[in-house]
Amino acid sequence: MKYLFCFLLVLNVGYAQTSSRLKDLVTVKGVRENPLIGYGLVIGLKGTGDGGGEITNSSMKLMFQKLGLNPQREISSKNVASVIVTAKLPSFARLGQKLDITVSSIGDASSLAGGTLLVTPLKGGDGNVYAVANGALSIGGLKKGAEFPTTGRVISGGTVEKEIAMDFDKKNSLRLALNNSDFTTAARIEKTINEELGGKYAIARDATTIDLVVPVNYQRNVVQLLAIIENFRVHTDNKAKIIINEKTGTIVAGGDILLNPVAISHGNLTIEIKGESGGSDKPNHLYYVDQKGTLNDLVKSLNALGATPEDLISIFQTLKSNGALIAELELI
C-alpha cells in the first residue's frame, strides 16, 4: 500500500538555534496539576440514557432518598445516564476557582446530548473531595453528528471546595526536574543559574534533577526568584536519534547524526559512504557520500534518486545494524 512520506530533520547547528527558556525545559517539584474523579448522574436526556441497570437504578433511588422521597418500586428511565466525571485541579487552586470538567458515560446511554449533570463531588487520589461539579453538557458537532456523543464537557462546571496546603513562598530550596533527561543540559542549567545569580546556588544531582537553594535576598520572595530564573535561556543538547513510524512512513531525526564509511546495496540502489581517501571512479549506479556527510545529505540524495519510504526505512535499519549510523533508532 502506498502512503505519503514525510521526513523532518532537526540538527543542532550552533547553540543560537537551540537556546530555550528554562520554563520550557523544567518543572518545579510540587507545582503540578492533580487529577480529580467522581461518579454522577446526567438527567434530561431525550430517551438516549441507560434505561435502567443496577448502578443507575441504585443511584436514582439513593438520590430520591436524600431529597426526602422514598420510592417503593425500582426506578427505570431512559432519560438518565450514569457517568464518570473527571477534572484537573490546577497547582495553587483556591476556593471558588472554576474548573472545566469532562463527563463520560459508563452505561448503555447512546448520547449525552442535551443532558444536565447533577451535583457531583470530585475526589483526589487521597479520597478527599476537592471540587464539586454540575451543569449542562456540551457535546459539540451536533449539527454534523457528534463522533463521540457519549462524552461531553461542562466549561467552568466545577468549583474548588478544598485547597491543597502549600507554603510555597516559605521554601528555602527548590527542586527542578528536566522534562527530557540529559546530563549535558542539566549541567548547562546549573552553570547558567549560578552565573546569573552570582553564586553556587544550583547543583545538578543527575540527568533530571537540579536542586536550587533560595538566595538570602529572595527569602519569602520565591515567586520573584522563579519569575527571573524561568526566563534564563539555556542551550539544550539532543541525542542523535531517529524515530520511524512505519504505519505512516514518517521519519523524525534529531541531533547531529553522522555516517561512517559503508556500502549498501538495496534493490536497484547502491549506496557507498567513503572516507576522504576513497577513489574518485564511481559507476553510474553508485551514489557517493563523503565521510563527513550527514543523514540529511543522504536522504536528500536518495529522494532525488526516487527512493521510497520503504527503501529509506530499510536502509536506516541496515545502517544501524552495521554500525555506520551513529544514532539511536526507535520504531513506533
Image (cartoon, rainbow, N blue to C red):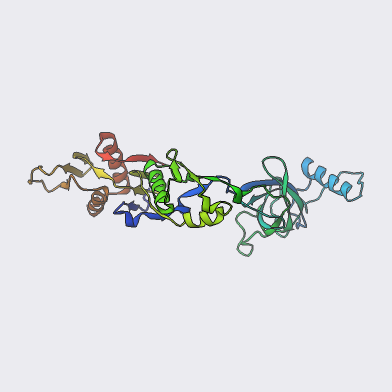
- Which quadrant of the structure image shows residue 142? bottom right
Q: Estimate the x, y position of residue 55 in percent, counting from the top left.
A: 77, 42
For the residue pair 255 and 323, the one nearer the viewer reads as: 255
- Which quadrant of the structure image shows residue 135? bottom right
Q: Residue at x 43, y 45 (%)?
A: 200
Q: Is residue 146 left or right of residue 73?
A: left
Q: Estimate the x, y position of residue 47 in percent, counting from the top left.
A: 76, 55
287 above or below 113?
Answer: above
For the residue pair 161 and 54, the one nearer the viewer reads as: 161
The C terminus lies in quadrant: top left
Q: Estimate the x, y position of residue 320 in percent, counting from the top left.
A: 29, 37
Q: Residue at x 10, y 46 (%)?
A: 283
Q: Is residue 233 left or right of residue 84?
A: left
Q: Residue at x 18, y 44 (%)?
A: 291
Is residue 82 something one can see in this rendering?
A: no
Q: Estimate the x, y position of residue 204 in percent, counting from the top left.
A: 43, 41
